[in-house]
Amino acid sequence: MRHVIALDVGGTGMKAALVGDDGALLHRARRATGRERGPDAVIEDILAFAAELRAHGAEQLGEPAAAAGIAVPGIVDEVRGTAVYSANLGWKDVPLRALLADRLGMPVALGHDVRTGGLAEGRIGAGRGADRFLFVPLGTGIAGAIGIDGRVEAGADGFAGEIGHIRVRPGGVACPCGQYGCLERYASASAVSAAWAAASGDPAADAADCARAVASGDPNAVRIWQEAVDALADGLVTALTLLNPRTMIIGGGLAEAGEVLFPALRDAVRQRVTFQKLPTIVPAALGDSAGCLGAGLLARDLLTTTAPTTPEVST
């Protein structure tokens, strides 16, 4: 059975799958990233994990994978196939595509984790059918994927979509990027977690706890939540002014708040729009499988010279 290897590398764990031509997930596996052992060990673990997946396909599916796709965090040069920089994994200029191709003996596609997740959401998830979309996951930080006609724009140097570093509160909280008042310092899941932990007096409290407190009417939680929503709306309106997406897809940990988030966010964006066309704002559909599914799409794109199709995917 023809299939591809899909591998999503995170800061702490790796998710992988063998994906058939019809989009079905034929095999799934997980491993720890093992970043505590250093960057070289992480690279070797990735190569070994991919080789195990190739062997599994050959044994269980009758042939090895035809191609592989891998999504990684940090700064990624998809054209050169290089993981340029990752603070979490300690990487700098790692020729990951070439290393995997040599180990596996097959074509390999390398992608940025958020852009790859956005590719999946755009083609087979919440943005399916939208010719222009913006995917924004709200997690430890905030990034974005700009979708255009079934592909995701990387930019001239691989930096496109860094919406988390739009300055929504000039002169505000310092950001590790060197600026002050960046969006992710106010509206990421980690920012809400920190604010609610301080306000509640519970150092273990997180954004999900804040959302539950908002639902129960806690005034401090409502204040913190609204501040995050307002900052997020400011950032999204800047993005829609520049990009004019038809659909905005909001994912990540904060989006799991569901109805606690989306009505307030849609209202806040609506209040800020003047001449701009208001996009549809929807929750992401693929959850933490998006990166892996997107890596599979990257791999399958290597096997065709025609425009990519959008088959159903079993999750």
Image: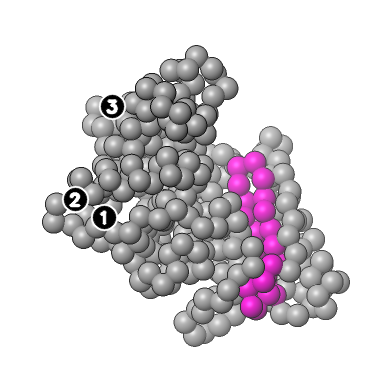
Taking 20 as reference, is 15 above or below it?
A: above
- Residue 126 horizontal side relative to residue 91, left or right: left
Residue 309 showing in the rendered view:
yes
Residue under numbered circle 2: 273
Percent coordinates x, y for residue 13 in the rendering? 67, 45
Residue depicted at 48% across the width and 55% down the height: 284
CB under 8 Å between discs 2 and 1 = yes
Magenta-highlighted residues:
3-25
Residue under numbered circle 3: 172
C-alpha gap between disc 2 and disc 1: 9 Å
- Residue 76 horizontal side relative to residue 10, left or right: left
Q: Nearer the viewer, mark 3 or mark 1?
A: 1
Q: Return the residue found at the far right.
A: 59
Q: Return the residue found at the far top.
A: 201
Taking 265 as reference, is 25 above or below it?
A: below
Percent coordinates x, y for residue 7 in the rendering? 65, 59
Q: Return the residue found at the far bottom.
A: 306
Percent coordinates x, y for residue 182 in the rendering? 33, 36
Q: Label 2's element?
A: loop
Residue under numbered circle 1: 240
Observer-nearest of 159 and 292: 292
